[in-house]
Image (tube, rainbow, N blue to C red):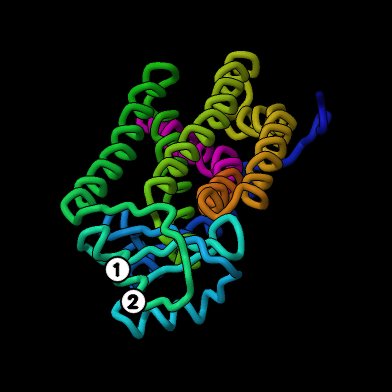
Amino acid sequence: MRIFNKTNIDFVGKSAIAKFLSMALIIAGLASLVMKGGPELSIDFTGGTIAQLQFNNAVDVSELRSTLAENGFESSEIITFGSPNEVLIKTQFSGANSELESNLRTAIKSEFQVRRVESVGPKIGKELQSDALSAILLSLLLILVYISFRFDRFYAYGSVVALIHDVLITMGVFSLLSIEIDLTIVAAFLTIVGYSLNDTIVVFDRIRENVIKHARESLDTIVNISLNSTLGRTVVTSLTTFVVVLSLFLFGGEVIKNFAFALIVGIFVGTYSSIYVASPVMMYFEKKALAKK
């Protein structure tokens, strides 16, 4: 299936504009993270309790939040869950589950059923933070090694810089929108890394083929030829994936909504970075090595 036939877009020539855009997005995200003292972490990482409550009637979330705040549940996060009469309450409460249920019944006058209560201790939360960071760093290291063997180290540098770019921008978007990061979002980050890497490898493989096929051309020309020849495949893959993830975001419910949103951001950023980040970084190191020779 071909959407674009024989395009001749000067991707390399527009890389300076793309660099400015990437830097602006990363700086905005990092500034938000610094001002907020880091990403907003869910109780998966900080410790606390999640309670899923089902009421007989529809719930006014703002009124429920005020009621809980007046009864010792300050800074609780409340979201509707599945239906208007079912809510998910995330609180920093660290006592026994039975004590939490008793306190909730004292605070809330309406009748409700407790569908689920889950607790995470602060020690476990710290361990999860460390494990999540280790998982992301280890994946980047293994990718660096894999790309170095399959292509060369300059391609590996481009791949890893592009992946770091994708994760930083996605995390920055979450910080700017004040969305909490939980374990599902970490899973989304790793999914974004895999998606972006797959697209980057396709582009790099075509560049490697064209280096042999167009040996007399400059590296800039070869990269442009390669990006144009893979453009149709890139667009089709991104659009089909986006449709699936958008469906999850719109109809998947509250539990998976933030995960799907992270993937939506990741699809756009990952597609962009395979063209405007991975290839230019690879070219920079290749040209630098050639200049030394």
Q: Residues within 10 Å of mark 2 (few under 14, many from 20)?
A: few
Front-most of residues 112 and 92: 112
Disc sitting over residue 169 in the figure: none
Query: In this figure, which residue is indicated by the disc labeled 2?
Result: 106
- Secondary structure under tag 2 reads helix
Which residue in the rendered view is the most extreme toward the left?
A: 123
Front-most of residues 97 and 165: 97
* Amino acid type at image mark 2: Thr
Disc sitting over residue 102 in the figure: 1
Q: Is residue 15 visible?
A: no
Read off the magenta span. Answer: 269-293
Where 70 sits versus 144, above or below? below
* Amino acid type at image mark 1: Ser
- Whole-percent x and y of residue 186? 39, 45
Residue occupying the point 43% across, 46% down: 184
Residue occupying the point 43% across, 83% down: 66
- Whole-percent x and y of residue 55? 52, 65
Front-most of residues 290 and 28: 28
Which quadrant would residue 71 be assigned to in this image?
Answer: bottom left
Q: What secondary structure characterizes most of the magenta part?
A: helix
Residue occupying the point 61% across, 59% down: 83
- Whole-percent x and y of residue 279? 53, 36
Quarter of the image for the N terminus: give it.
Answer: top right
Query: Is residue 291 on the magenta stretch?
Result: yes
Marks 1/2 in contact by CB < 8 Å: the verdict is yes
Which residue in the rendered view is the most extreme toward the front?
A: 111
Front-most of residues 230 and 30: 30
Q: Is residue 61 visible?
A: yes
Residue occupying the point 46% across, 40% down: 281
